[in-house]
Image (tube, rainbow, N blue to C red):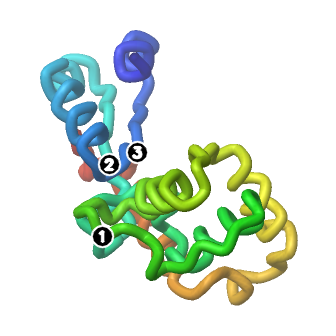
């Protein structure tokens, strides 16, 4: 696991986890490693940030793609797969992760699994067209700014966390 490697190298390091069941499980496992005790002994810290909380995303579950508006991510999926899924086609199954909701719709409507590599190609095409922060989809810059400020603050002396 990355945590053990980073600690073994005596790095001041951290991890950004999805705010979902798997992310919470990983966070619990890291807590079991007595990271705070290690930090006290060595002066090296390992930080754990949850993407939803760190970026101020107002969803129950959040992953890195949730920094962007759902409509924009869905547009990238539609271009990647040549489909026309709409937001109202996405299930309301309790998960707020856009990727999980899109994957469910993609499977039920088109019999296809979501491969984020295909979506990433479309995302990168959009990224290449953005010349200024004002070109970003609405809300993305604010989410990213909150995330980066939280990461920066966690590495500032006196703000250590795990």
Q: State the quadrant of the C terminus.
A: top left
Vertical position of residue 41 compared to residue 95: above or below: above
Instruction: Check if mark 2's residue and mark 3's residue have beta carbons within 8 Å.
Output: yes
For residue 128, side relative to residue 87 (left or right) = right
**Could one spot residue 148 in this view of the protein?**
no
Nearer to us of marks 2 and 1 is 1
Vertical position of residue 106 compared to residue 55: above or below: above
For residue 84, side relative to residue 70 (left or right) = right
Mark sitting earlier along the chain (2/1)? 2
Mark sitting earlier along the chain (2/3)? 3
| Of 84 and 65, the residue lying toward us | 84
Q: Secondary structure at mark 2?
A: strand
Q: Which mark is residue 92?
A: 1
Q: Provide the residue designation for mark 2.
A: 49
Q: Secondary structure at mark 3?
A: strand
For residue 154, side relative to residue 21 (left or right) = right
Q: Residues within 10 Å of mark 1 (few under 14, many from 20)?
A: few
Mark sitting earlier along the chain (3/1)? 3
Q: Residue at x 22, y 41 (%)?
A: 24
**Could one spot residue 46 in this view of the protein?**
yes
Q: State the quadrant of the N terminus.
A: top left
Q: Position of residue 158 (x, y in %)?
A: 25, 50
Q: Secondary structure at mark 1?
A: loop
Q: Residue at x 27, y 63 (%)?
A: 93
Q: Position of residue 151 (x, y in %)?
A: 42, 55
Place residue 80 in its image quadrant. Answer: bottom right
Q: Which mark is residue 16?
A: 3
Q: Position of residue 64 (x, y in %)?
A: 49, 56
Vertical position of residue 32 compared to residue 78: above or below: above
Q: Residue at x 23, y 35 (%)?
A: 27
| Of 10 and 111, the residue lying toward us | 111
Nearer to us of marks 3 and 1 is 1
């Amino acid at each position: 696991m990355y945590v053990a490697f980073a600690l073994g190298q005596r790095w001041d390091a951290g991890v950004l986890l999805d705010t979902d069941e798997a992310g919470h499980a990983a966070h619990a496992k890291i807590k079991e490693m007595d990271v705070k005790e290690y930090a006290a002994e060595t002066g090296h810290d390992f930080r754990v940030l949850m993407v939803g909380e760190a970026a101020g995303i107002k969803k129950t579950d959040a992953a890195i793609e949730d920094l962007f508006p759902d409509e924009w991510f869905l547009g990238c999926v539609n271009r990647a797969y040549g489909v026309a899924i709409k937001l109202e086609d996405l299930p309301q199954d309790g998960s707020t992760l856009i990727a999980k909701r899109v994957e469910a719709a993609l499977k039920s409507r088109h019999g296809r699994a979501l491969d984020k590599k295909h979506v990433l190609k479309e995302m990168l095409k959009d990224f290449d067209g953005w010349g200024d922060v004002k070109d970003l989809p609405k809300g993305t810059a604010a989410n990213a700014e909150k995330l980066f400020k939280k990461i920066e603050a966690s590495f500032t002396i006196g703000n250590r966390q795990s």
